Each structure stands twice: as structure tokens, then as C-alpha cells.
Amino acid sequence: MSVSTNIKKIHLLGFLKGDLFPGKLIEDLKKIKVKNALILGIGGFRRVVIGYFNQEKGYEKIELSVSENEAIEVSSLVGSVIFRDDERYSIHIHVTLGLKTGDNSYASYAGHLIEGVVHPLLEIFLIEVDDINHSILKRIWPHRYK
């Protein structure tokens, strides 16, 4: 089962130190009147909460944070935005993160992005797509409409 759409426009968004993501993203989506899009990004966070989905418990959350002089590297941010037929945004983003650990080595983390505080910046490519047929999408991705 699938649904097709076309690329409408590509928006380049910049988020600065201290911006709360994805809250600021939702503000920007409303300002530029984007309803449905793919999201690609790179940059950094000072604090970030990611989740791992557990079928029985929902998301198990992990919070990562670093000092003001460091950053959690966002090596990959990918996801989608859907403006649902009940006029709410459904944002689904996954990230791959890297950070320096206490023993001067590095660790990688990946998961569902719940929220992050941008540091020092976040570069986003927002690939806007045409309207989507929600009746079909509800059958393909029912979890996005709960």
C-alpha cells in the first residue's frame, strides 16, 4: 500500500543556540505555512532526549547533556511532518548523535528525537510536499493518527 505526492519546495531553516527543537520547528512550519514535509538535518544539541520504542511500555527515554563548552553532535537527523486532518502536526524524527564520554573516548546514540536544546546550531533541509490523501495514509501509518 502506498500514497504518492510531489516535492513542492525546499526550505532551508536555521536554529540557533538555545532554541527548543522540535517546538521551534512547529512555530516555523506555521509561519511558512508548510503542512507536509521530509526533514533532513545536521548540527548540535546541548541537551537532548531520545526514545527507544518498547511495544509494551511506549518510549523508554534517555537524556544526554554536555557542558556549555561542548556539543552533542547531530550527525544525522531524518524524519517527516504531517499536518493531520484534525489540524494537528504529527512530527516523527530520528537522530544519530555523537558525544565525548568521560574517559575521553566517544559514544554514539540513536533513537526517536523527543526534544533537544540546540547548541551551537542546527541546519535543517525541509522538503515540502503537496497535500497527502489522509484516508490512505491512515491505513499505511495508523500510528501517526492516534
Image (tube, rainbow, N blue to C red):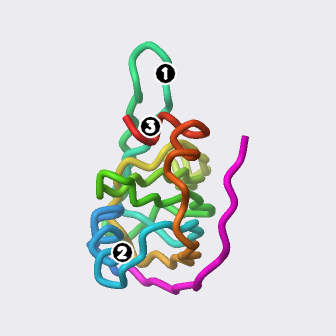
Q: Tell me the distance, in whole angstroms, between the alpha carbons under discs 2 and 1.
A: 30 Å
Say if mark 3 contacts mark 2, CB within 8 Å.
no
Q: Tell me the distance, in whole angstroms, between the alpha carbons under discs 3 and 2.
A: 23 Å
Left or right: 10 with respect to 92? right
Q: Main secondary structure of the magenta part?
A: strand
Res 54 label: 1
Q: Picture coordinates of residue 74 (x, y %)?
A: 54, 63
- Which label sits in the foreground, 3 or 2? 2
Q: Residue at x 32, y 67 (%)?
A: 26
Q: What is the residue that sits farthest to the right in this orientation? A: 1
Q: The disc labelled 3 sits on which kind of residue?
A: Gly
Res 43 label: none
- Which label sits in the foreground, 2 or 1? 2
- Is the C terminus in the top left, top right, bottom left or bottom right quadrant? top left
- In this view, the residue in front, 28 or 121, is 28
Left or right: 135 with respect to 91? right
Q: Picture coordinates of residue 73 (x, y %)?
A: 53, 63
Q: Alpha-carbon neighbours of circle 3 within 10 Å: few (<14), some, or many (≥20)?
A: some
In this picture, is 69 found above or below 32?
Answer: above
Reading the image, the residue beneath label 3 is: 51
Q: Earlier in the sequence, mark 3 or mark 2?
A: 2
Q: The disc labelled 2 sits on which kind of residue?
A: Leu
- The secondary element bearing badge 3 is classed as strand
Reading the image, the residue beneath label 2 is: 29
**What range is drawn magenta here?**
1-15
Q: The disc labelled 1 sits on which kind of residue?
A: Asn
Q: Residue at x 46, y 75 (%)?
A: 122
- In this view, the residue in front, 113 or 86, is 86
- The secondary element bearing badge 2 is classed as helix
